[in-house]
Amino acid sequence: MRDIYCSYYTESYDITSYMVSKMGISENELILEPSAGEGTFIDEILERKIKVRIDALDINKDAILKMQKKYSNIADVNVRLTDTLLDETLDSYANSEIWLKNTDILLDEQLDLFSYKGGHYDRVIGNPPYGAWQNYEKRELLKKKYAGQYIKETYTLFLLRSLSVLKKGGRLSFIIPDTFLFLNMHEKLRKILLTNAKIEEILIFPSKFFPGVSFGYSNLSIITMEKCDRSEALNNSIRIIKGFKSSAEFEKILSNKFEKHHKIFELKQLDVFTTEKSRFILADDEVSTIIGVSDRKLGDVASVVTGFYSGNNKKFVCAKNENVKNSKGYNVVDINKIAYTTSLTGTDGVGEVYIPYVKSSSSTRYKRAEDEWFVRWDSETVKFYNTDRKARYQNSQYYFKKGIAIPMVKSKEIKATLMENRVFDQSIVGIFPTDEKDMDYLLALMNSDVINRLIHIINPTANNSSNYVKQLPYRVPSLKDRKRIEENVEKILALNITTDSEQIEKLHRQNNELIEKAYL
């Protein structure tokens, strides 16, 4: 179930059982559930008949009241609706205690106090909200409180907050998207986790394992960690497991029983911490070394930028015909209004004019078979692009220049194409070599299997954003091999991309082998 707070309630026994087991809960411990929701983790803890106190917090008052009703009639459980977590209690409990508080844990002042004194809870377990909307006033408060963090993503703030109120030696288990492992925006979060906790284990699995959730852009993960000092944290090794076919396999992991399809990575926290942007690189040693130690990146030899947005594509962008992929709702261009200008200010003295436009993915590598999209480019309309708040006339110094286009949306394999005398859409990442002599080699490189594997490892989400593309390791083959690659590219560009596909594929395979040799 998903509510207005972007909470995805945990409704999988395999997940809750694994996470509670990883907590290693003992009697009389103080446990925090910072986003208690329907109390699924609490149910699992109570099933184990361990006398503990659980502070169950939630920003949703209805959720708190439902839990109060749910647990009030259970024998051997004392339920307390409270506005304070600071009351003195006995060291041991005659019954399990559930204290319910309706609060925003990101701003709760009592949790501030727990954080300042170095921790309060023995265990923290949770399924925080993902991407919950924050009004602008709250955003300003969060920016000050969590300086340097990406405050638009709530799950990362919940993770930081929960770690701050955990005692040294205390354990935490969260189910969260796996994007914290590699996205640039979460670099500071990774550095805090790597230096303040021993990350014991991370399971990565498809979001479909979690009922009611299906992220197209990432997987889910369960992270288990123990709070400690910096030296202990950096000496720790992390076990990361991928390749699950069902959540039923989680129980076997508790007994170190693995299936052949499981992929297991052992990473030293110090190695992750010292990797560029402290990114988790989940690959074999050879590929990890390429990413970790390459002196040059693609961004060192080329400008890597995002393209143009009209502000209203259905109004200003037309398709060649109705058969163009994803053209539903777009007008078909009037061929009498097509122009071939390279003016950044648009065509003067005419009415409605359209120019060829590089948009969306290509069905072919190296070059596109035809212009399928056109964007309006008369001078009055270009003036509108420059002033409209929704339009993005960005990186215009690269419009009409010779470069390489790859789609922003990731697919099974990258198909890079040459573009020249064209404006390119924001759905395209444009690559413009500093030295144009590198153009042919870069075109072959961006179509290679090596680069395809590396971009999926550096950023496993659904997007090839420019910030990740420019971080790709850049290696050059021997002079002999590079010359051969460049000759092959020239041959490909001279061939007919449709009728000569077999010959093009043969030349592409030769390029692949030569580039593979340079990288591996």
Image: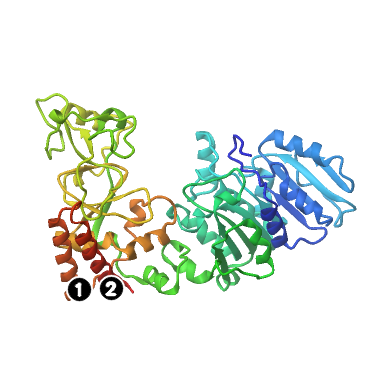
* Relative image position of residue 455 (x, y in whole percent): 37, 59
Can residue 341 be seen at all in this image of the molecule?
A: yes
- Extreme residue in the top direction: 351
Q: Which residue is mark 2?
A: 518
The colouring scheme, among rainbow, by chain, secondary structure or one colour, is rainbow
In-image side of 416 versus 266 (left or right): left
Q: Is residue 268 left or right of residue 44?
A: left
Please tell me which of labels 2 and 1 falls first in the chain. Answer: 1
Given the image, on which type of amino acid does mark 2 rest?
Ala
Q: Is residue 394 above or below residue 21?
A: above
Q: Are marks 2 and 1 in contact (CB under 8 Å)?
A: yes
Judging depth in this view, the residue of 371 and 133 nearest the camera is: 371
Position of 391 with respect to 114 (left or right) is left
Residue wearing tag 1 = 481
Q: Secondary structure at mark 2?
A: helix
Residue situated in front as seen by the camera: 462 or 34 = 462
Q: Position of residue 184 (x, y in %)?
A: 43, 55
The image shows residue 111 at horizontal and vertical percentages of 67, 48
| Residue positioned 19% across, 44% down in the render | 370
Label 1 SS: helix
Residue at x-position 65% and y-position 48%: 112
Q: Nearer the viewer, residue 268 or 514?
A: 514
CA separation in Å, label 2 and label 1: 9 Å
Q: Is residue 39 above or below residue 438?
A: above
Amino acid type at circle 1 is Asp
- Which quadrant of the figure has residue 443? bottom left
Occupied quadrant, residue 122: bottom right
Q: On the rendered image, what quadrant is the C terminus found in?
A: bottom left
- What number of labels is visible? 2
Q: Is residue 472 visible?
A: no
Q: Quadrant of the N terminus?
A: top right
